[in-house]
Image (cartoon, rainbow, N blue to C red):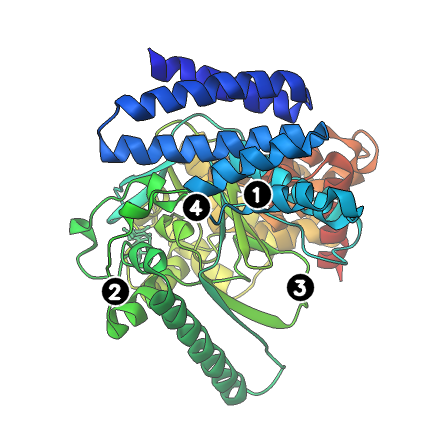
Amino acid sequence: MNEELMQQLRSKATELLLREEYKESIQVYSQFISLCQQQHLSNADEHELAKLRKSLCLAFSNRAEARSRLKDFYEAIVDCDQALEIENTHFKTLLCKAFSDIQNNGNSESLHGYLEICKKLEYQSRTGVFDLSDWVLNGFRGKLPEMAEYIGSIQINKSEYSGRGLFATKNMEAGTLLLVTKAIATGRGIMPELDEDSSQSARLVMWKDFVDKVVDATNKCSKTQRLISTLSSGEDEESMEVPDINLFRPEAEEDFYMKANPEMCKIMNILDVNSLTEDAISAKVLGKNSDYYGVGLWILASFINHSCLPNARRLHIGDHVLVYTSRDVRAGEEITFAYFDVLTPLKKRREMCKTWGFHCNCKRCRFEEVFGCREELKEIGLTLEFGLDNGNMVFRLEDGMRKWMLKGKEKSYLRASFWTVYSEAFKSDKVMRKWGRRIPTTEVIADSIIEAVGGDERLMKAAVEALRKNGAGGMMETEKAMKLARGVYGKVMKKQAMRALLELCVQDQNH
Ligand SMILES: C[S@@+](CC[C@H](N)C(=O)[O-])C[C@H]1O[C@@H](n2cnc3c(N)ncnc32)[C@H](O)[C@@H]1O
């Protein structure tokens, strides 16, 4: 009962603070604080006590902020002291105390700015509302946007693919943010257009630097040690523990982080299995030089398995990675992104899986494994390799799918596998004059693939160009283009910025 009341009071007080109704917020925080103190006196459970102390610290800190906003600096400092007694390094409280302390010196501008940033980060990590609009509209110039870490509606569970995976805990539409996390370490370097040997050795130097940084971070911090030790090293993934998602929250209790210092060779294996390169087909990197190559370890993103029918993508900004749904996702569905290009035929995908050291058993691979034995399909695959008339190929494939009575999803799987043939055909005016009336439109094909395989920059571009050609709704103004863009870049900016980014991508790929 008390717990429920405390929850209500805390939410109410925070809401009032965010709405800048400071007096009312102070009143509700005061009720919350006295309830918390009573509970603290009557509770003996160590874990509960730690939770109460954390809540108290935050409540004092927030009440201090409200008091400082009302220029009641004396009382604000008293509250800050109470919060700091519980957690002497609480950053927001320290700032608030410093701000209140120096009010008389009239030197408050920069500190006020810090307080605003703290407030923004807290809001982001609680709500998952990230807005990169200004930065995007500014052409990615200036400082990288400040970003908090965030964990959305996800949990870790046993996966049917292998070991553990990340799962949606509620229905979400395309573009919904799932997580934002900062790299444990990254390695970056300019990769000059050199011969194969030189670029190989440049990569090796960068990899070594990256490994050193990870080892350093692991030695310095028991929390990093503990988190890294939850990751798969590729061995016996099935028997690995399924960690609680709360372990990965920045505010997780200290006692979660028992010592677990992994050995050097284990760290190397963990990095082999879990490191991500920034420039991947299912990722977009914003605000960096096009010729540098980056690799990093982002712990929570490391629980995401590969599927040839992925439902998520990632955005890299500085050391942060943002993972979001690339199509609508149902509660309970596993979150996956593509480790490599999945708009390719089964044979090519099998080769890629081999280099990653696993055998993909997703629905699409299973279907194509059985269905691909058809002579006609084999023949189309073979002809593909010789680059014959793309229009004819598309026609034969579509005609075949009709004859074989394939269902919607199955058609999408094959269309995704042969996307390059479709795309070449759609690009050629000559081919379209000859075959255009006998094959489905770009929009139909792109929609069908996106539904199965999720947002992809190439599909989005083809669909947007087709929309423009048909003059649908006038240029980029259509809701459809925006929806496609949300599935590719995530819902992390307002419409105007999204339009600018979309425009940039379309121009980029035309050059
Ligand atoms: C980044 S980890 C993903 C999380 C991992 N399953 C775990 O339990 O920690 C990558 C490893 O997951 C496994 N994996 C990922 N996608 C897979 C798939 N589609 N089929 C089989 N295994 C997969 C492979 O063992 C791969 O080396």
Tag 2 near tag 4, CB within 8 Å: no
Query: For this rendering, which residue is in front, 158 or 219?
Result: 219
CA gap between label 2 and label 1 equals 31 Å
Q: Tags 1 and 3 in contact by the CB under 8 Å rule?
A: no
* C-alpha gap between disc 2 and disc 4: 20 Å
Q: Mark 2 or mark 1: which comes first in sequence?
A: 1
Dot 1 amino acid type: Lys
Q: Position of residue 290 (x, y in %)?
A: 67, 68
Estimate the spatial distance between the alpha carbons at disc 1 and disc 3, rounded to whole Å. 31 Å
Q: Residue at x 62, y 81 (%)?
A: 192
Q: Which residue is tagged 1? A: 92
- Looking at this view, is 454 or 294 the one in front? 294
Residue 500 appearing in the image: no
Q: Position of residue 207 (x, y in %)?
A: 44, 76
Q: Which of marks 4 and 2 precedes in the sequence?
A: 4
Instruction: Indicate the amino acid at tag 3.
Output: Lys
Indicate the secondary structure of the residue bearing disc 4: loop
Whether tag 2 and tag 1 are in contact, CB under 8 A, the answer is no
Which quadrant: the N terminus?
Answer: top left
Along the polypeptide, which appears first: circle 1 or circle 3? 1
* Beta carbon at label 2 within 8 Å of ligand 1: no
